[in-house]
Image (spheres, rainbow, N blue to C red):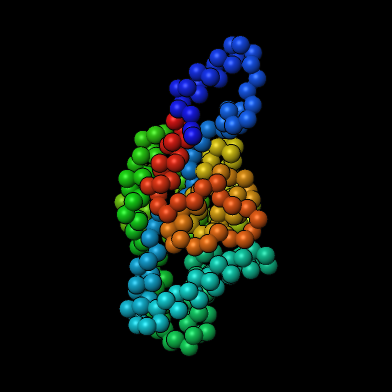
Amino acid sequence: MQMPRRKFVKVMAGSVATGIAISGPLAAAADRPAIKAILFDAFPIFDPRPVLNLMEQLRPGHGAELMNLWRTRQFEYTWLRSLGGQYQDFWKVTQDALIFASAGLKIDLSAAEQRQLMDAHLSLKPWPDVPAALQSLQHAGLRLGFLSNFTPAMLASCIKNSGLDGVFEHVLSTDAARTYKPDPKAYQLGVDALKLAREEVVFAAFAGWDAAGAKWFGYPTYWVNRLQTPTEELGVKPDATMPTLTELQTRVLGKRG
């Protein structure tokens, strides 16, 4: 059971005054840095489902299969290019993955259809719970930012389309480091921009592998597991898992008292 903030402060103050040593959970809570900022991956904020819907409209009965292969190859290409030192930005990687997926499934997409699917990434809107949750976090004094594989142009377009201009103090693309998450150099962008210790920055991930990467780096990591997928078997677990941004907001603000 969590101790109310006032009681906690009273206990700590009394212990200092009397010289009593604090140990166990109270000591851990006292030593834990306060959370000052949250960095979000793109998809806890932006809903990618319209891309799948468009795919299904273009190729009825094949949309899900094509989308799954496209997304899988998209992230495999980011990792392969990072490992191979052959960087291309996320727009190019996404386009190449789409070409591969359609060829692999023998689905002939015209150039116009490819453009439609690519351009859908520029007009994503927020999940329904996002505006209210972000407003509450802002009002509580938390600094908010993006740390995403999306290119700067993709992030800027989606932010504008979502009516979220001015909400995020930093809009960080891993393009600045010419690499991709989970490379530590990608996560380091957040520490450098915010000028905070990594322990003071919550990272909100959408994918399980990104939650693992952020945890490896040392961020307190909250996994917004909107798709309810299993935890990746990578030797680490996020600090908390929740299905929506509303739960993330509640948990973060609860920890701040």
Q: At 43% across and 58% down in the image, what residue appears?
A: 226
Which residue in the rendered view is the most extreme toward the top?
18
Above/below status of 35 relative to 187: above
Q: How many labels does the image show?
A: 0
Place of residue 61 in the rendered image (x, y in percent of width and height, measured from the top left): 37, 83
Q: At 60% across and 15% down in the image, what residue appears?
A: 16
Is residue 129 left or right of 22 when viewed as pictured? left
Question: Which one is nearer the viewer's eye here, 71 or 96?
Answer: 71
State the quadrant of the C terminus.
Answer: top left
Place of residue 167 in the rendered image (x, y in percent of width and height, measured from the top left): 38, 44
Q: At 38% across and 69% down in the image, what residue appears?
A: 51
The answer to whether residue 186 is visible is: no
Question: Which one is nearer the viewer's eye here, 216 or 76?
Answer: 216
The answer to whether residue 12 is visible is: yes
Q: At 35% across and 62% down in the image, what residue appears?
A: 123
Place of residue 23 in the rendered image (x, y in percent of width and height, measured from the top left): 64, 26
Place of residue 11 in the rendered image (x, y in percent of width and height, measured from the top left): 53, 19
Above/below status of 97 relative to 42: below
Question: Which one is nearer the viewer's eye here, 217 or 116?
Answer: 217
Is residue 249 left or right of 71 when viewed as pictured? left
Corner quadrant of residue 15: top right
Which residue in the rendered view is the most extreme toward the right?
84
Above/below status of 50 relative to 66: above
Question: Which one is nearer the viewer's eye here, 245 or 168?
Answer: 245
